[in-house]
Every structure is written in C-alpha cells, then in structure tokens.
Image: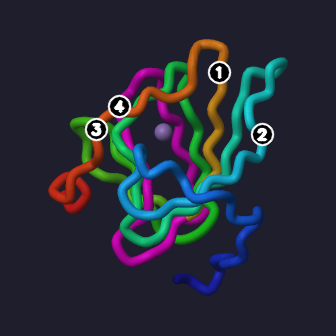
Amino acid sequence: MSSSENNTSIFPKGEKAAPDYFVGTAYVNPLVPNDPTLHIQIWDVVFEAGARNNWHTHAGGQILMATKGIGYYQEKGKPIQVLRQGDVVNVPPHVKHWHGASPDSEFTHIAINPNTQGGVTVWLEPVTEEEYNG
Ligand code: MN
C-alpha cells in the first residue's frame, strides 16, 4: 500500500450481505436505500479478501467508486480490472459484470445505482474460482 493511500473507512460497516448473491463475506450499508424522487440508490460495500458478488446486470447502469483496499471488476468477455482507492467505474445498463475484493486485500467501494424506476439489479450465477483467478 502506498504511503499516499488513506486507510480510514469513511462509512460504518453495514449488515452482512445476503449469501445468495455473494461468494465469501461482504457487508452492505444502504447510504441512500432508494430515493423515490431522485430514483437513486447508494450503497457502501465492504468485501473481505476473496469475496465477490455474483455475475449481475443493472437496468439503469451503475457507478462504482473505490475507497479502500484493492478490488476487482470484470465485464463478461473482458479481462479483470484491478481497482484501487480513487478509481471510478461506469457500468453501462444491462452489461453483465461482477465486482469484489482481490485475493489478499479487503476492498471497499461506494455503489451508485441510478434510474431505479426501471429496476435495480438482476442477479445471475456465481463467479467461479476459475473466472476469479483468470
Ligand atoms: Mn454491479
């Protein structure tokens, strides 16, 4: 970890994420549960090392902001991208993807889900060890 990296958590750790949609342990804090006027939902998510969510899509797209640790992001058919503090990912609507921690580091990101009037997340199959290690 570089000396310029801030290792302080910004938001409190939330509740354990539903195991149906994650491999490993993750914690989700609903910063904005679902604003009915702005049509937006914002989560702070902490992934323990090796933890990741299942493959999924967002009807309204998603923005991820990496805030702590080292994480992974992958779109179907593309290489895994390494995410570090300060990285921002724009996930287009309906693009199949997953995100989570790298094998040896906890990872925290803020997830912004806009356009929630069209649905939020469609959960798909788990990310296999082969895909995760790819
Ligand atoms: Mn996502």
User: Dot 2 lies on which element?
Assistant: strand
User: Dot 1 lies on which element?
Assistant: helix
> Does the residue tagged 4 have its C-beta within 8 Å of any atom of ligand 1?
no
Separation of disc 2 and disc 1 at Cα? 12 Å
Question: With 29 as the anchor, is 18 left or right in this view?
Answer: left
Instruction: Give the label on residue 116, or none.
Output: 1
> Does the residue tagged 1 have its C-beta within 8 Å of any atom of ligand 1?
no
Q: Magenta includes 86?
A: yes
Instruction: Give the label on residue 32, or none.
Output: 2
Mark 3 = which residue?
125
Tag 2–tag 3 contact (CB < 8 Å): no
- Seen as rendered, the residue at the extreme left is 130
Separation of disc 2 and disc 3 at Cα? 26 Å
Residue type at mark 3 is Glu
Q: Give, as a single range, the part of the protein colored magenta.
A: 84-107
- Earlier along the polypeptide chain: callout 1 or callout 4? 4
- Earlier along the polypeptide chain: callout 2 or callout 3? 2
Mark 4 = which residue?
96
Instruction: Give the label on residue 74, or none.
Output: none
> Does the residue tagged 2 have its C-beta within 8 Å of any atom of ligand 1?
no
Separation of disc 1 and disc 4 at Cα? 17 Å
